[in-house]
Image (tube, grey):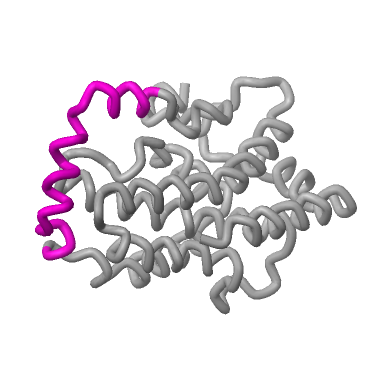
Amino acid sequence: MNIAALNELIERAHQHEASTGQLAAQMHAQLERLHPSIRVPSDDSSGVLQGFVSAYIGQVPEVLQAANQVAREAGIEAQIKPVLKVAEQFFLQPPALMAGHEGLDGLLDEAYLAHRLVEEVNDRYIAHLGQPLIPLDTTVANLIAHQLIGEPFANQLDEAVQHAVEGMLDDASFAQDSVQAYRERLSDPQTEAAWQRWPCLSQQLGLELQLDESRAAG
């Protein structure tokens, strides 16, 4: 994984934001049409949204690096690394549908692709092993990012993720002896203790998703 290149790209996006204020303006505009299920517990709502986007983007290198390390420990790096490389390329060489997207605004789209790709890998791990590849729960954060990006573009990004992951992780990938041995280690108390250090990403970033629509509307 080219983590240094990812971090450099993120740093350049922050410099772009410092000179243009593009993301800050966009998040301020988002407040008027923010989905009622997204709860922003702060008087500085646009600042919280901007902080969420910045941290959501910043998590990508760490998440990809962690996923690659766990896959290596599980003995299925050969199967997982190509998927993670696709996520990395979403950042370094974004698809044509991202043309014209700059700064942190553009990286939000690319971070969404990367996080959603890891989420898809996690879903396959859960289906086969009963545990995710990495314990960081990005589901709610991804739903929030989906809302911030807006439809129909976010749906196009979801389609790109589905296309990228199809055929990469089939049942045979999880049938290897090394994977089964890793499954047995998942219940180890030390593994469980280590995973407690990975909180839900959305809660960590100060946002919540209220899925009870009757309460959200009240």
Q: Quadrant of residue 166?
A: bottom left
Extent of the magenta region? 172-196
Residue ID at (37%, 68%): 82
Of residue 205 and residue 26, the one placed in the foreground of this image is: 205
Horizontal side, residue 180 vs residue 90: left or right: left
x and y percentages locating residue 169 in the rendered image: 23, 64
**Relative height, residue 127 to residue 2 (above, below):** above
Horizontal side, residue 130 vs residue 149: left or right: left
Main SS, magenta region, reads: helix
Farthest residue to the bottom: give it: 96
x and y percentages locating residue 175 in the rendered image: 10, 58
For the image shown, how many numbered marks are present on the structure? 0
Residue ID at (21%, 44%): 126
**Relative height, residue 186 to residue 4 (above, below):** above
Residue ID at (43%, 29%): 198
Asked if the stretch drawn in magenta spans residue 180, the answer is yes
Horizontal side, residue 176 vs residue 151: left or right: left
**Relative height, residue 166 to residue 127 (above, below):** below
x and y percentages locating residue 29 in the rendered image: 72, 45
x and y percentages locating residue 140 in the rendered image: 42, 37
Horizontal side, residue 69 vs residue 91: left or right: left
Asked if the stretch drawn in magenta spans residue 175, the answer is yes
